[in-house]
Amino acid sequence: MHAWLDFNSPLSPARSAAMVERLARGNPRTVVDLGCGWGELMLRLLAAVPDAVGTGVDINVEHLATGRANAASRGLADRASFVEEPVADFSGGPGDVVLCVGSSHAFGDAKPPAHTAVALRALRGMVGTGGRVLFGEGFWQRPPSGDDLARMWPGASADEHMDLTALVDLATSAGFRPLWIEAATLDEWEQFESGYLAGKEEWPASHRDHPEAEEVRASADAHRSMWLGYRGILGFAYLTLVAC
Ligand SMILES: C[S@@+](CC[C@H](N)C(=O)[O-])C[C@H]1O[C@@H](n2cnc3c(N)ncnc32)[C@H](O)[C@@H]1O
């Protein structure tokens, strides 16, 4: 279902290459990817830093299997581990670089937006002074109106996210300095959401008589409606943070 996506976040090849280059500069020995999915960013970083070892943590067994297969096909299997475990239970680490992209909700039961502060505090505990965290998180590009919210996910509320300034302030108050602040462009969002939806559209198109085809189509309809509701309003920030 994710055949159209390199990453499970709105991230272009050009931006990911620049991130990898930036993170590789510190010559990290250990990389931890929390809520890694199939761990594409971690694998690209390991490919760029030949001595580094990486651990990806996720609860989705299919994504983890994809990560292991990709690691093997790129000759990285001896340096990349994929662990099936909730992030909140992970006791490995610390890492010289910790990646947390789109997975701040995995650090405990705190509700949005408090979960972002919980995640940042936990991440600060996973790197030593000078260590790097790449934190990918949603934010409001502009305050959503009531009508905007009604077109998003069920129960969407304006206080679920903060703006970019408040997000960066939260990171600094958790003990980081922002090395690099960037946010997904509309084009990256469109590639991501369209790629995600294309995966959902293709399967029922070629399995018309399958009993689950209608269910998959309905789930694509629901997701498309949400995406067109938050398009241009929900942002996604990539903060490269240095622990201080
Ligand atoms: C939006 S995806 C991002 C994946 C990856 N970081 C990327 O950017 O490609 C969020 C990931 O968090 C994982 N996840 C959600 N809750 C989790 C938890 N409690 N523990 C570990 N992983 C979790 C999901 O399975 C999913 O792979």
Image: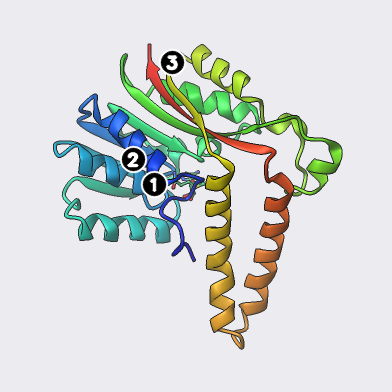
Residue 85 x %, y %: 40, 46
Label pair 1/3, CB-CB below 8 angstroms: no
Q: Residue at x 40, y 45 (%)?
A: 36
1 shown above or below 29: below
Distance from Cα at disc 2 to Cα at disc 1? 6 Å
Q: Is residue 70 left or right of residue 243?
A: left
Q: Earlier in the sequence, mark 2 or mark 3?
A: 2
Name the residue beneath numbered marker 1.
Answer: 13
Name the residue beneath numbered marker 2.
Answer: 17
**Image-quadrant location for residue 49:** top left
Tag of residue 176: 3
Residue 12 x %, y %: 44, 46
Indicate how the structure is coloured in the image. Answer: rainbow
Q: In the image, which is nearer the foreground, mark 1 or mark 3?
A: 1
Q: Residue at x 66, y 38 (%)?
A: 234
Residue 25 x %, y %: 24, 26
